[in-house]
Image (spheres, rainbow, N blue to C red):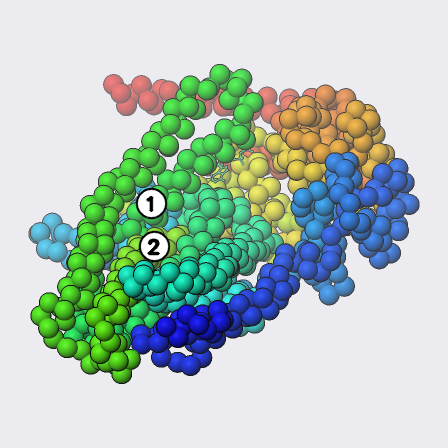
Amino acid sequence: MAIQSKPLSSNLAEWLSGGRAGLGKSSTRYGIVVILAVLIVLRRRLQGILRPAAAKKGKEVHGRSRPQVIRKQSSFAHKAKEDNSLLNELRSKAPATEEEMNAALEELYVENKDGSYDLLVPYRRRIARVSINETTQRTIDENYPFFAKQPPVLDKRKTRKTTSEGKDVEKSIDEKRLEEAKTLREEGGAAAASAKKVGVNKEFFRQLRAIFKVIVPHASSKEVFIFLLHTAFLVLRTYLSVLVARLDGRIVRDLVSANGKGFLKGLGLWFLLAVPSTYTNSMIRYLQSKLAIGFRTHMTRYVHDLYLNANANFYRVINLDARLDGADQFICTDVSKFCETLSALYSNVSKPTLDLIIFNYQLAQNLGMKGVLGLFGNYLLTGWILKKVTPAFGKLSAIEAKLEGDFRSAHARIITNAEEIAFYNGSKIEESILNRAYMRLIRHVNSIYKIRIAYNMTEDFVLKYCWSASGYIIIAAPLLFGYKKETSSAEKQLSEKPTNEGMASKTESYISNRRLLLSLADAGSRLMYSFKELNELAGYTSRVYTLISTLHLLERGQYQALPRPQGIPDDQRFYDMGNIQGRVLLGSDSVSFENVPIVAPAPGMERGGEELVRDLSLTINNGDHILITGPNGVGKTAIARVLAQLWPTFKGSLKLPADYDPFFLPQRPYLSAGSLREQVLYPTSYAEFIKSGRTDEDLLQILKDVHLAYLPDREGGWETRKEWKDVLSGGEKQRMGMARLFYHSPKFGVLDECTSAVSTDVEGLMYARAKEMGITLITISHRPSLFKYHDVLLRLHGEAGKWEIERLTTQDGQAKSFNDEIKDLEEKLRDVDQWKKRVNEIQGELSLSKA
Ligand SMILES: Nc1ncnc2c1ncn2[C@@H]1O[C@H](COP(=O)(O)OP(=O)(O)OP(=O)(O)O)[C@@H](O)[C@H]1O
């Protein structure tokens, strides 16, 4: 045979061009050679393009010379201020020690001149430098219209009610909204409640389109390039599959015709083809993961920019709105699952689709028109059957994600409150709570598995067995029933060859067609599997969309709005997050409340927010230290929340100075993840500290003022990184809070019971120091010992939101003496007789009415 006498390369081309049943194009002759060449060229380019950003920019840095830096922190700080010389100093290839890593980690980021910043990320004992560009307000505004619409929670069928006469009427919009809020509350957030409606429908494609604005921000994004490359590899894989099918047939032909040499060559080619095939497969997987990571990075950064924006959306999500339940689960898990499913779906859909087209084309060449019609009839029928038996996977996966979130947050609560739970010996009850959350999740997952049994059986039966059987029939029909397809000239030649060779050719043709049919069945089942994945993607899409959409709405102060319930009297106030009428005005000389009710918001509750303090009017001038006092739960901290603009000003006006930048010290001191130095600096970063020109000596002086000067020595230096909330005692944590106040030295300091665990003598010294520094104190406390550090007392009573203001200093600014205080108290005692008289009167009236 001519083929046996030719050199290997030409044999390869000829074999793979397929002679009689080849791809029919001369270019395929050199297919393998071209593929190999392309791959070799691409390999180098790919490495360049797909390498992590830090490595690409050659920006790996770490703390090689850091020990000196630690010793000479202050001189180094000034050096670093000049032009990132710290980073230049730290740049080296050798891995850093733990101490060096900690020191370099403290940097966190380096600001660039164009407003962007380079984040310093620990990575394999080195610090990688990643450029971060925050999402601009313009991009957020441009994307807003795509996310402004939230999917309705209520099903249309449920928006009808029956009147007393038994008539079925449409519900009013208000009633629908109230019912929707109730559904949200019961189901635990919009994503969970609207999961009932999730599926591959118009809404899904609308949401996906909106999300694409985030995950592929520009046509020139790196993901577009990865996507194109991925597509090229997918096409290549299909092309290689066809070549493998051809080669398979040839090898069997040589076996049947006992052509040993031809068989060995075929085997050699088989291994040769394996090289690009395996490379292509692993590149497809790699690019798919790369795409998923790219999508996730875009989305996570976008979500973080919205979540941690100046309006404190992270606070609004939890306290002022009921649409998102467990934002951490959305951001950490759902975003990742969405991105992975989306990128996997692309290769899972495109590959079998491409396979179906190419294999069908190939089979059409081999089997003729009738065979193709048979195949298509088969597809339509099986497709219809599978559509009928496919369960609502989208809805199921959205519910699963919600239950996963519940389980995760139950665990998070234990981590946050470990000590308290341990003191209460609460393991048993906490375990029951955890187990219950887990069992709810597992029951749901189990029910999905059960649903899948029947579905997978049908899918396997239809795609593996029915498709193969119909494939046999289509191949066998011309042989058994003798109908002739349009034969190519190559086939005509073969059919005229002697019987042995004709038999071998028939075997070859059968094997090739059989392989193509098997690949076709495989492609079909993968496509069907993708449909299942598409449904799951719909579930994740609905959750991710709800996350981004809610953050967009909250960013613009658009809360979930509820109508005034019909049952409440006209004179009763109704505070709803959708109806905020108060104003916050900047530019005044002092901080002043003018008829501002202090209201605890109740997101998603029909009764509306609860009024804690009625129409507060109060002016706090610079240097007018004010103490707010009153019983527990009366609304003292609530005033601080309104001052911080965390809670809305529902009515009246809140006037603030133009440069209003108060510092709040909450009841529970928060200690961040970071070094000891960062605990004092919080919330400013180390980079800003360096920029300010202040030094560790300054920080030590501050620690002296709060009686914590021993800490750097005790904890092993300023760079020590620990879980500070466990390391410091209650009083130490509060004193650290005061240290932060002194470091920032603001005009106004809002101190909410922030020294309740500090001994009275040290507390007094700290208050005196704060006043010395010119900080105007707005203190919330029950401790009478603090009266003497304040000028004005705001006393909240709690009954019907009553409050009163009292001066604690005399006209000349002196603290009231004990004599003054006694006089005040005696004045008050004078009223006691009247109050007693009134109590007797009321009791008398009550006993009369009973009689
Ligand atoms: N995030 C919130 N959402 C809704 N209501 C809240 C929220 N936080 C607190 N409340 C409610 O507001 C009321 C006032 O709370 P606040 O924290 O202002 O009390 P307080 O006067 O500071 O009490 P204490 O002296 O115990 O600290 C309480 O009834 C509380 O249940």
Circle on res. 399: 1
Residue depicted at x 66% and y 24%:
730
Question: In the picture provided, is 796 more to the left or to the right than 255?
Answer: right
Label 1 sits on a secondary structure element that is: helix
Q: Residues within 10 Å of mark 1 (few under 14, many from 20)?
A: many
- Nearer to the camera, 426 or 245: 245
Camera-near label (2 vs 1) is 2
Query: Is residue 574 visible to us here?
Result: no
- Nearer to the camera, 569 or 600: 600
666 to 258, vertically: above or below: above
- Nearer to the camera, 528 or 682: 528
Label 2 sits on a secondary structure element that is: helix
In the rendered structure, are the residues bearing label 2 and label 1 in contact, judged by CB atoms less than 8 Å apart? no
Residue depicted at x 43% and y 21%:
839
**Residue type at mark 2?**
Glu
Circle on res. 533: 2
Name the spot of residue 832 as percent of width and height, x first: 54, 21
**Residue type at mark 1?**
Ile
480 to 590, vertically: above or below: below
Residue depicted at x 20% and y 81%:
486
Circle on res. 772: none
Query: Residue 749 occupies which quadrant of the picture?
Result: top right
Residue depicted at x 45% and y 79%:
27
Q: Earlier in the sequence, mark 2 or mark 1?
A: 1
Locate the C terminus by quadrant: top left
Marks 2 and 1, how far apart at CA: 15 Å
Question: In the picture provided, is 675 more to the left or to the right than 177?
Answer: right
- Nearer to the camera, 295 or 509: 509
Q: Residues within 10 Å of mark 2 (few under 14, many from 20)?
A: many
Question: In the picture provided, is 707 more to the left or to the right than 840?
Answer: right
Name the spot of residue 255 as percent of width and height, x first: 32, 60
Name the spot of residue 74 as percent of width and height, x first: 88, 43
